[in-house]
Amino acid sequence: MVFNFLFDKVVTGERLYRSLGTRLVHVGLFEGGLFLAAVPMIAYALDVLLWMAFVMDIGVVAVIGVYTLLFNWGYDWVRYKIRAE
C-alpha cells in the first residue's frame, strides 16, 4: 500500500490511462523491491546459499509480476467505472 501510494504521488493523472510502459515500471519497481527483500529471507529460511535463493525466487517473481500487472490494470478499470457512475 505504501509503495502504491508513493508511486501515485509521483505518477499523476487518471490511473486508467497509464501506458503499458508506466505499468511495467510500476511492476518492475514493486517486484524488484520484494525480490531484494525476499532472497535473503528465503536463503535463511531454507538454509541455502544466496544464489540458490535467487534462482528459486526468479520463477515466483515472474508469475507474481504478471499477476500484479493484470491486477492493477483491472483495479484501475473497475475504479474508473465505479467513479463514473
Image (tube, grey):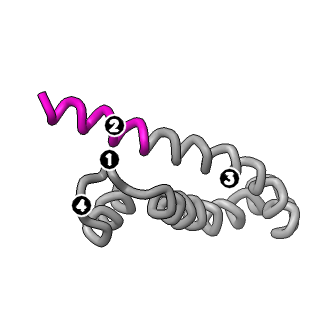
Dot 3 lies on which element?
A: helix
- Which label was assigned to residue 36? none
Q: Label 1, on which residue?
A: 16
The CA span between labels 3 and 1 is 24 Å
Disc 4 vs disc 2: Cβ atoms closer than 8 Å?
Answer: no
Mark 2 or mark 3: name the one nearer the start of the chain: 3
Residue position marked by numbered label 2 in the rendering = 77
Going by the numbered disc 2, the residue's amino acid type is Trp
Stretch of the chain drawn in magenta: 73-85
Going by the numbered disc 4, the residue's amino acid type is Gly
User: Quick one: label 1, few (<14), some, or many (20+) residues within 10 Å?
Assistant: some
Label 1's element?
helix
Question: Where is residue 21 shown, x and y percent of the image?
Answer: 50, 62
Position of residue 63 measured from the top left corner of the image (x, y, whole percent) = 68, 44
Cβ–Cβ below 8 Å for labels 1 and 2?
Answer: yes
In the drawing, does residue 3 fall left or right of residue 64?
A: left
Answer with mark 1 or mark 2, whichever residue precedes in sequence: 1
Q: Amino acid at mark 3?
A: Val
Q: Residue at x 24, y 38 (%)?
A: 80
Q: CA distance from mark 1 to mark 2?
A: 6 Å
* Residue topped by disc 4: 13
Q: Secondary structure at mark 2?
A: helix
